Image: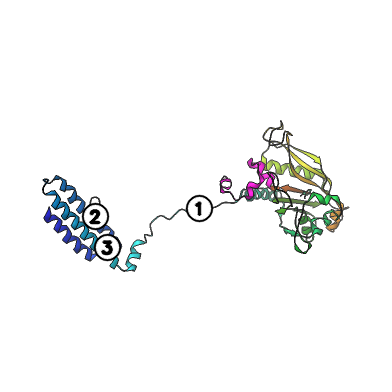
Amino acid sequence: MKEQLHKIKQRGLEDLEKISNMKQMRSFEVQYFGRKGELSQVMRRIKDLPKNERPALGKLANEVKQALNIARSKAEKSLTSKQREVSVIDLTWPSQPHRLGHLHPLTQFLDKVMNIFTSMGFEVLEGQEVETPEYNFDLLNIPKNHPSRDAWDTFYVEGGMLMRTHTSPVQLRAMKKKRPPVRLIAPGRVFRHEATDAGHETTFYQCEGLVIDRSITVSNLISTLEQFLKEVYGPKVKIRVRPEYYPFVEPGMDVDMQCLICDGQGCSVCHQRGWLEMLGSGMIHPKVLSNMNIDPEKFSGFAFGLGIDRLMMLYHGINDVRLSYSGDLRFLEQF
Ligand code: PHE
């Protein structure tokens, strides 16, 4: 066995001299130091020797191992860095999986809304987030000292401009360039100077709708919005229409949807009312049509404003609007 150990050492040192890359180095290690390597095999047999021979052989085996190991690390160091690189990069090694993000639930929902309206022949427009008071209020029939202005808590910015409080100014901006007939929606961010709570945010999303043509009536408005709500929430949807005041429409109305959770029986989601307020709408006020340079005698139209956040929350059963803007992955990863 002594003989054998010397031979292993001899051969090992010779083998090391021939090594020219890291791949060979690794197989050298397996061959000599591996669990089933030559040295281990000899060392395993030492315990079968007579007791008095064991210490000397054990010592020799360790010396051989150490000598080979020192020679091995010297040889490894002397391999040029290039040889190391070539052998270490294994192009067949599977890559690390990438963590992909996905669209925000609000964006996903907005896509759904846009798909429904474009399939009904609406075009999609974008407006500007910083507006003049003229477009946000005056041209929408909300004069400066009129109390109805109080319904929109406003952030004013430099130069007398403001962060738009609703998407309705896009109605007027669009009609600077277009003539009836028009069917358009304008989704986007809006801003209100509000204290936040589960139902209110300072920044949220609306989607404006505008239809102008000859002889457009309230029934066109109702059927369009009913169809939209059915597309989103399913064929069981029941709606009701309530009068509501918005200065830029006449008549103005809110559309409610029967609560889908309790089938109108009353529950915590609908605050025991059985109905959920879904959106504001109405027939465009003749004054607003005139501000668009459209003759109210010849044309009529309707407009609506969807609160995208609310509709999305109802769709997914989310009870706090602030979650959408928290950036909390525990929330976002559920969609
Ligand atoms: N702009 C209104 C709001 O933000 C909603 C609305 C739009 C109402 C269009 C009627 C017609 O409250």
In the image, is 294 to the left or to the right of 189?
right
10 Å neighbourhood of mark 2: few (<14), some, or many (≥20)?
some
| Label 2 sits on residue | 33
Q: Which residues are magenta?
A: 309-335
Q: CA distance from mark 2 to mark 3?
A: 13 Å
Residue 85: say if magenta: no
In the image, is 223 to the left or to the right of 113?
right
Res 96 visible: yes
Q: Nearer the viewer, residue 263 or 56?
A: 56
* Image coordinates for residue 167, horizontal then vertical, percent: 75, 53
Q: What kind of residue is marked 2?
A: Phe
| Label 1 sits on residue | 99
| Label 3 sits on residue | 73
Q: What kind of residue is marked 3?
A: Ser
* Image coordinates for residue 304, horizontal then vertical, percent: 76, 48
* Image coordinates for residue 228, horizontal then vertical, percent: 71, 44
Identified at 26% across, 58% down, the residue is 27
Q: Residue furthest top?
A: 265
Is label 3's Cβ within 8 Å of ligand 1? Answer: no
Identified at 11% across, 47% down, the residue is 52
* Image coordinates for residue 134, horizontal then vertical, percent: 82, 59
Closer to viewer: mark 2 or mark 3: 3
Identify the secondary structure beneath mark 3.
helix
Is label 1's Cβ within 8 Å of ligand 1? Answer: no
- The numbered mark, 2 or 3, whose residue comes first in the sequence reads 2
Q: CB atoms at circles 2 and 3 under 8 Å apart?
A: no
- The majority secondary structure of the magenta stretch comes to helix
Identify the secondary structure beneath mark 1.
loop
Q: Nearer the viewer, residue 41 or 22?
A: 41
Is label 2's Cβ within 8 Å of ligand 1? Answer: no
Residue 332: say if magenta: yes
